[in-house]
Image (spheres, grey):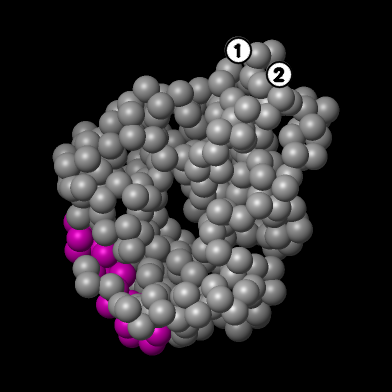
Amino acid sequence: MIDSVKSMRGSKKMIPTIQLNNGQKIPQEGFGTFQITDFETCKTAVLNALNAGYRLIDTAQVYRNERAVGAALQETTVPRADIFVTTKVWLPFFGDKITAQSVDNSLQRLGLDYLDLVLLHEPYGDYYGAYRDLEKLVAAGKVKSIGVSNFDAGQLLDLSHQMKITPAVNQIELNLYQQQTALRKFQNERGIVTEAWAPLGETSGAILQEPAVLQIAERYHKTSAQVLLRYLVQLGAVIIPKAAQFQHMQANLEIWDFNLTPKEMNQLANLNKNNWLSPNRHSLCATQHYMDLIDEGLDY
């Protein structure tokens, strides 16, 4: 459920929140830290994002930047209660007791005593044991909400049937060229929030130059990127665009002062190409790739 009136307290921008299936609220727009690995660069980016008005910060164990994110969280003047922090557990740390220990390690790197959301990063390995560990962390008060990333509808249905806590979020690849219509419908019906990684198709020139997108952007005096982000939030998704420069961070927040019409939404829906940026997780080749990642481990 979107709360279009209330925003995260202290935010400079009126970013709506969405109520998760456990009653917690998540900002509908956040700042993603994927591929920002340099410590000072990441710390500065997160501080800039918080200063711009972001209140959702997304990181992951495999990003290798939790310490830098944590340093920014310790330095900012924004109260901890006003910041929604997400991390994701990486594949080698899936399993009974292993996952809980890895989250404790993430908390230590981040300098926090609780996380707002923890996701299982991929649907491989012992994600049943991993998810049961997350349920225990919720009971212990170390994690407020739990969910998954890159799961398909069948995997979500199976996991939800086996576990006590239904995933609050599924973070998936979602953009104009990969709209995942059937999966979003499934999640909406079950109260699982869709969170979009790579919301700008990260970022192909073609997606920004679509004639329909350019026409809509001109109509509202917005950029193509702002139109693409607005489209996703009107679909009900949480978005976590990444930006290294402060002006781009600010620009990505300028999407809350206009609304796309039903006709415009339909125009953009028709541009779906079902194009994947990530590996097709239903292929044997992709499965082998993720098995190799499990065997590789993570020295972090």
Q: Residue at x 56, y 43 (%)?
A: 201
Find residue 169 and report its image quarter: bottom right
Element at label 1: loop
Residue 113 visible in rendering? no
Image disc number at residue 215:
2
Taking the spot 21% from the left edge, 47% from the top edge, the residue there is 38
Viewed as shown, does residue 36 lie left or right of 255?
left
Range of magenta residues: 95-111
Q: Nearer the viewer, residue 216 or 106?
A: 216
- Label 2 or label 1, whichever lies nearer to me, is 2
- Closest to the observer, 29 or 270: 270
On screen, residue 42 above or below 118: above
Label ID, residue 288:
none
Residue at screen point 30% across, 47% down: 36
Position of 121 compared to 79: left or right? right
Dominant secondary structure of the magenta stretch? helix
Q: Is residue 218 above or below residue 281?
A: above
User: Where 69 sits versus 135, above or below?
Assistant: above
x and y percentages locating residue 199 in the rendered image = 55, 43
Is 104 in the magenta? yes
Which residue is tagged 1? Answer: 221
The answer to whether 78 is drawn above or below residue 52 in the figure is below
